[in-house]
């Protein structure tokens, strides 16, 4: 016999289910879709908190090595109390669970007015007399997915994930439960789990910390993102006709993590952003989760609210910036309205030493900057731009003195933790903290930098010494890295932080909240840029997605427009051979910058719709891509890219949210576009072309055809 307690949080309903033993589970469903009066499922209670304490029995059903869910520890927790805490702006459901030895877990699900998600995390407290060693503790765990389908939901459920590889971030992977072998067995006694995640200090280095399950019959989605900068895991699980999903820190099996809790000690998990909704597509559902980042970006420095255009000199100087070449670039871009100028890697390198093996000492090069960095920063300021600088704070290169300072570097099994060309600072070490205050914060203050690109170009892997487990050593080290970023923001008020990790390896909610924007990828010049940039709308806010347009003096006007238009999917960042471009080439760029400024309000806040099929081959794309973004005030833009020739002569795109009229367009030549009814028709003419169309709701404001 189960009893339900229901809480309405915005457009979501939280159902806490309790069985006769006091075990509690949680369902989150759309508030406008009531639960069926009778659930036709053979299903046992799945716990609200997934936990495993060392010494307790591991789960059966052939689970060991595949999952630690539903252990003796999890099944032994019973509800002690539950309360609804209300504030002026929101609500929090607080559920207290405890077992007989004094292992107490407080589960919190909090919601703020206007949100389309809840934040969930757990705090474990040892109220017993002996040390508790955790091998697993989830941030969230949902049961009853989906309650609207009878039986085992055969053929009606899909699992959506976002894959990530270097320079190919954000690919959507959609599979049925059957394809994942998550059908229950005939005897319903064998555990099935799809446990996935990432191990190391690059949290988006295989998958994004995201999962969504779709009831395809009823168009209902259930899903979550994790805000965690180290090893994490998600699990889709079943042993009977129930479907459950959980996530949080990578456990002992998956992420080499254990945590000791002495009597009286507590430990809190990272937060999960969780939602459920009835909607037509996974794309719309994803944007419910990415909304969680809006509060942080709205509190970003004032200059960020207009999404200024960035110039980064990396693809101009290739890691060898100098006062001479930077002043040449400044002359070329004079008066074009750039907001930020970033001095990228190499400003510190010794003569004849590459930038990527010498980071860590961070003494400005007297050869590259003979009159000091201050003169170069002043030149940037004289052009009306904020000056930015690159640091790789946590890593050191093998050509640096810091590389040999092993007393203050991370170790594994007693040896300095070394990858090809790199070692890692122990970010918890007081000496390291003081060193970075001097070399990083001191540099920012001394020269007047207002922008810092925070790069990170390798991963620690399973973890490091210094704690009760390698995974806990990693977690603590990454927590200290995040604390240092917060110190930077305190010490340099108003600084703009760019989150970069070989491009997009840290595009998770925690790092994204700490920074104003992020490098969307290390895809600088390749043709797949618009595909990656569009995919990332499912994972991060477009206003935080810094996209490169690298212009070469050999580029055709069509190629330049293709590159510039890519940036309309996020934040515009220009680089390349700007000192050698012709007037015609600059005209295409200038028109693109003007178009970008028009659509900034739509990039800043809006909804994205994918109007074309998913591109199967990212490296060698064929066909076309069409993206529609509708702003919060109703205006919109469409961005079309053609790839290798496999597309219709006339592209036909549905325009939800209309009627619209064409206010402006952008391409290398006059765009052949028109609107008839609720459709946009575009004749791209050639492959490898970009066409952007600005749409207004008010006819009177539209340009003449």
Image (cartoon, rainbow, N blue to C red):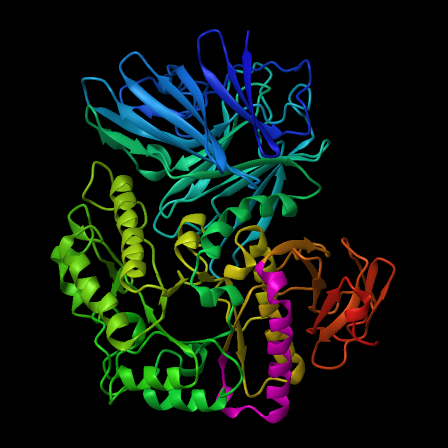
The answer to whether residue 64 is left or right of residue 397 is: right
Q: Is residue 369 above or below residue 459?
A: below
Q: Is residue 605 visible?
A: yes
Residue at image position (37%, 45%) is 199
**Residue furthest right in the image:** 676
Choose between 454 and 197: the one closer to the eye. 454
Where residue 297 appears, as percent x and y from the top left, is 47, 56
Residue 540 is situated, as x and y percent measured from the top left of the image, at 52, 53
Query: In which quadrant of the rendered image does the N terminus lie?
Result: top right
Q: What secondary structure is the stretch in magenta mostly built from?
A: helix
Range of the magenta residues?
Answer: 575-604
Left or right, 14 with reference to 433: right
Q: Quadrant of residue 639?
A: bottom right
Q: From what the image shows, is residue 187 above or below residue 305?
A: above
- Position of 301 relative to 178 (above/below): below
Q: Is residue 358 among the parts visible in the rendering?
A: no
Residue 700 in the image: above or below residue 49: below
What residue appears at the point 62 percent right and 43 percent down from the top-left corner? 285
Q: Position of residue 482 (x, y in %)?
A: 31, 52
């Amino acid at each position: 016999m189960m009893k339900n307690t229901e809480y309405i949080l915005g457009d979501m309903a939280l159902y806490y289910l309790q069985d006769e033993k006091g075990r509690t589970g949680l369902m989150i469903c759309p508030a406008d879709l009531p639960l069926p009066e009778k659930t036709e499922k053979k299903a046992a209670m799945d716990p609200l908190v997934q936990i495993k304490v060392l010494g307790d029995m591991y789960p059966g059903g052939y689970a060991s090595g595949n999952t630690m869910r539903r252990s003796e520890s999890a099944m032994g927790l019973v509800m002690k109390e539950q309360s609804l805490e209300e504030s002026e702006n929101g609500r929090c459901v607080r559920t207290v669970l405890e077992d007989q030895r004094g292992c107490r877990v407080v589960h919190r699900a909090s919601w703020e007015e206007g949100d389309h998600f809840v934040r969930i995390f757990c705090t474990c407290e040892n109220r017993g007399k002996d040390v508790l060693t955790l091998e697993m503790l989830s941030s969230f765990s949902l049961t009853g997915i989906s309650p609207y389908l009878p039986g085992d939901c055969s053929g009606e459920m899909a699992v959506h994930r976002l894959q990530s590889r270097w320079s190919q971030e954000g690919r959507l992977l959609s599979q049925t439960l059957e394809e994942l072998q998550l059908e229950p067995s005939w005897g319903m006694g064998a555990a099935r789990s799809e446990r996935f995640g990432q191990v190391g200090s690059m949290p988006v280095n295989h998958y994004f910390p995201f999962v969504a399950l779709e009831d395809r019959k009823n168009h209902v989605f259930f899903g979550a993102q994790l805000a965690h900068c180290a090893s994490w895991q998600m699990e889709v699980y079943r042993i009977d006709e129930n479907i459950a999903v959980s996530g949080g820190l990578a456990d002992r099996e998956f992420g080499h993590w254990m945590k000791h809790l002495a009597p009286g000690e507590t430990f809190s998990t990272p937060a999960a952003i969780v939602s459920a909704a009835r909607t037509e597509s996974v794309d719309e559902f994803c944007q419910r989760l990415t909304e969680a980042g809006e509060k942080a970006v709205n509190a970003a420095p004032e200059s960020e609210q207009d999404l200024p255009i960035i110039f980064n000199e990396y693809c101009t100087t290739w890691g060898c910036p100098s006062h001479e070449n930077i002043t040449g670039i400044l002359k070329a871009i004079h008066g074009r309205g750039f907001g930020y100028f970033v001095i990228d890697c190499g400003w510190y390198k010794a003569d004849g030493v590459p930038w990527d093996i010498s980071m860590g000492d961070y003494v400005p090069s007297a050869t590259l900057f003979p009159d000091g960095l201050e003169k170069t920063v002043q030149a940037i300021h004289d052009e009306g731009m904020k000056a930015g600088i690159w640091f790789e704070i946590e890593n050191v290169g093998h050509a640096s003195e810091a590389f040999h300072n092993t007393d203050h570097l991370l170790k594994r099994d007693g040896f300095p933790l070394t990858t090809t060309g790199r070692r890692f600072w122990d970010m918890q070490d007081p000496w390291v903290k003081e060193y970075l205050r001097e070399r990083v914060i001191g540099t920012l203050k001394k020269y007047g930098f207002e922008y810092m690109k925070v790069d990170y170009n390798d991963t620690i892997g399973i973890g490091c010494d210094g704690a009760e487990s390698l995974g806990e050593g990693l977690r603590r080290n990454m927590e200290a890295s995040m604390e240092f970023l917060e110190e930077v923001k305190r010490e340099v008020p108003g600084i703009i932080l760019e989150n970069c990790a070989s491009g997009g390896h840290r595009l998770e909610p925690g790092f994204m909240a700490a920074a104003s924007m992020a490098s969307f990828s290390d895809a600088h010049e390749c043709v797949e840029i618009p595909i990656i940039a569009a995919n990332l709308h499912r994972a991060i806010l477009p206003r935080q997605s810094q996209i490169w347009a690298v212009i070469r003096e050999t580029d055709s006007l069509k190629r330049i427009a293709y590159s510039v238009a890519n940036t309309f999917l996020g934040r515009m960042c220009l680089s390349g051979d700007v000192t050698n471009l012709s007037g015609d080439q600059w005209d295409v760029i200038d028109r693109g910058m003007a178009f970008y400024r028009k659509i900034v309000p739509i990039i800043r806040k809006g909804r994205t719709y994918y109007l074309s099929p998913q591109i199967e081959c990212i490296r060698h794309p064929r066909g076309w891509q069409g993206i529609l973004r509708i702003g919060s005030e109703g205006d919109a833009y469409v961005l079309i890219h053609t790839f290798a020739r496999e597309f219709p002569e006339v592209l036909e795109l549905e325009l939800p949210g209309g009627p619209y009229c064409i206010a402006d367009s952008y391409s290398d030549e006059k765009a052949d576009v028109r609107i008839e009814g609720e459709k946009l028709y575009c004749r791209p003419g050639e492959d490898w072309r970009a066409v952007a169309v600005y749409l207004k709701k008010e006819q009177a404001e539209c340009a003449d055809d």
